[in-house]
Image (spheres, helix red, strand yellow):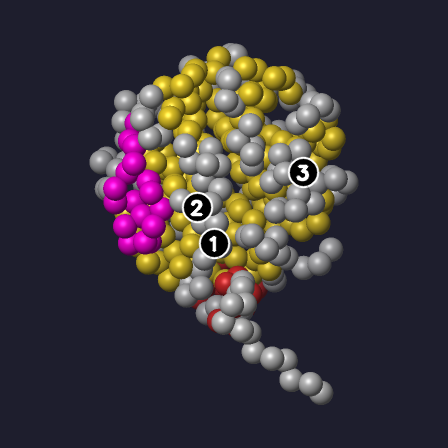
Amino acid sequence: MKATPPPTANAKVNPFDAFQREQITTEELAVAGGGDAKDAPAELVGILHGGHSARVTALALHADGKHLISGDVDGAICVWDVRTRQKVASFAGEHDDGRYALRLSFSAAGQRLATNVWPSGPAVFKSGDALTLLKRPVRHFRDYDAITIALSPDGKRLAASNRLGTATVWDVDSGQKLMTLSGHSEAIRALEFSADGARLATASLDGTVKLWDAPMGRELRTLQGFEGRALYCLACSRDGARVAAAGIGDRFKIWNTASGEEVATCHAHLGEIFWALDFSPDGSQIAACRVGWLTVWNAQAATVLHEWKMPGVRSVLFAPDGRHLIYGDQTGGIYVLRLRKS
């Protein structure tokens, strides 16, 4: 049998492939299983711990796939090296009296990171060495009481929403306010730029999703179908062709962004509130965490591919390879699942 040649120096190594279940201790499996190691997901291959002591509410991956940023309800933010599975930096109190990490958002190339830690407000940092990542903000919008934020793919614009149902877009370098987006009747709880930066999607407690021309601030269309039920999260596919939104209830919807046509409705057998959504890199799957459950659907057929009962899960993120799923829970742990082929 011919031996497999070792990887060359220039070979791109996927750090998530190095995770192995055998490296997880029985005690760690018990925490992941809610007290019993036997209840830990069979797909669990890695745990990042020692960084948070409170519920993990925000996750973001650098474009290199090697560094993960996480935030918790106490306002602490941690930087992880995925290759070593070690925390390389943590920041508590760096955002004045920050007490709740609401959102983390990287620009497409990873050169900038935006944070929203309540109540100190949105900030944008230059992404460099992990040890100095959150030390020197490019811009800090201290006077804006933001619910959530999104950084444009080029890192030049920051969008943030408030409790009045509007969103504001700033030029990050100058700090100048570029526009205010008005149209929702209640607070905007989620927003996201399309991958090309041309559109901005907003989801509101009024039960609607709006698509905006991001450079001009013009409303393009309103997406409905939730009968006024509050929306808490949304996700845009990497190609910008679809947007999904969810909130209160047992289902979420996916629309075609060009036509506004509803292309799928994904139903959950149990559910009260959806907290987070994320499309896989190729757009074929979508992950959602809701009260007590983490589920992956086929994004075209709206069928369930994987599902785990997980009390306390509040954040979810696909790895760049689309084969690994990252989530954070109420224990402060961050977990990596290796998805089986469906």
Residue situated furthest right in the rendering: 301
Report the Cα–Cα distance between label 2 and label 3: 34 Å
Q: Which residue is mark 3?
A: 268
Report the Cα–Cα distance between label 3 and label 1: 33 Å
Is 136 covered by the magenta stretch?
Answer: yes
Q: Earlier in the sequence, mark 1 or mark 2?
A: 1
Quadrant position of residue 240:
top right
- The circle on residue 110 is 2
Residue 174 in the image: state x and y as whole percent: 31, 26
Residue 153 in the image: state x and y as whole percent: 48, 37
Quadrant position of residue 21:
bottom right
Q: Secondary structure at mark 2?
A: loop
Q: Residues within 10 Å of mark 2 (few under 14, many from 20)?
A: some
Q: Residue at x 48, y 13 (%)?
A: 182
Per the rendered image, the range of residues in magenta is: 125-141
User: Which of the image's four quarters has the N terminus?
Assistant: bottom right
Q: Which residue is mark 1?
A: 64
